[in-house]
């Protein structure tokens, strides 16, 4: 399990933690979002990402996806962005294009 700490747009402390099949983002210790994934044949597929509506607009999904993609690269896996949030993030951050496969 990996944990990364940062802050959101409001300055609140955020923590992104990797679990067996998802990355979870917490704000001040409260889990408020997740990015589900599954690994197969050297590829990590992201089918779903969500953030609690009460916490939207704070950049949490961006933080969550960025950390998930960094961890995926570090694990030596390729990314399959089935989730539109992950696909949109990669489109805006081409530094992950080299590890991305089409969904």
Image (cartoon, rainbow, N blue to C red):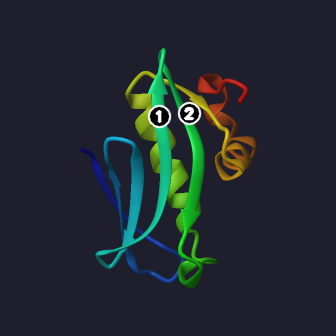
Point out the residue furthest to the top here: 41
Relative side of 50 to 6, left or right: right
Q: Look at the picture and state if 4 lies above or below 98.
A: below
Q: Find the distance from the CA under tag 1 to the CA under tag 2.
A: 5 Å
Sequence-wise, the earlier of marks 1 and 2 is: 1
Q: Quarter of the image containing the C terminus?
A: top right
Rendered location of residue 75, percent (x, y): 38, 27
Residue 57 pos. (x, y %): 64, 77
Left or right: 35 in relation to 15:
right
Residue 49 or residue 5, whichever sits in front: 49
In what element is the residue under mark 1? strand
The image quadrant where one finds the N terminus is: top left
Check residue 45 in the rendering and tell me which mark sits there, or answer none. Answer: 2
Mark identifier at residue 38: 1
Number of numbered discs on residues? 2
Circles 1 and 2: CB atoms closer than 8 Å: yes
Q: Is residue 83 above or below residue 32?
A: above
Q: Looking at the image, is 98 positioned above or below residue 2?
A: above
């Amino acid at each position: 399990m990996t944990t990364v700490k940062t802050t959101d747009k409001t300055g609140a402390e955020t923590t992104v933690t990797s679990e067996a099949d998802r990355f979870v983002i917490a704000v001040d210790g409260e889990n408020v979002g997740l990015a589900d994934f599954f690994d197969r044949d050297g590829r990590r597929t992201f089918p779903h990402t969500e953030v609690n509506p009460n916490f939207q607009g704070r950049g949490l999904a961006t933080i969550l996806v960025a950390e998930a993609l960094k961890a995926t690269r570090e694990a030596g896996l390729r990314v399959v962005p089935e989730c539109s949030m992950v696909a949109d993030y990669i489109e805006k951050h081409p530094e992950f294009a080299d590890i991305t496969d089409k969904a």
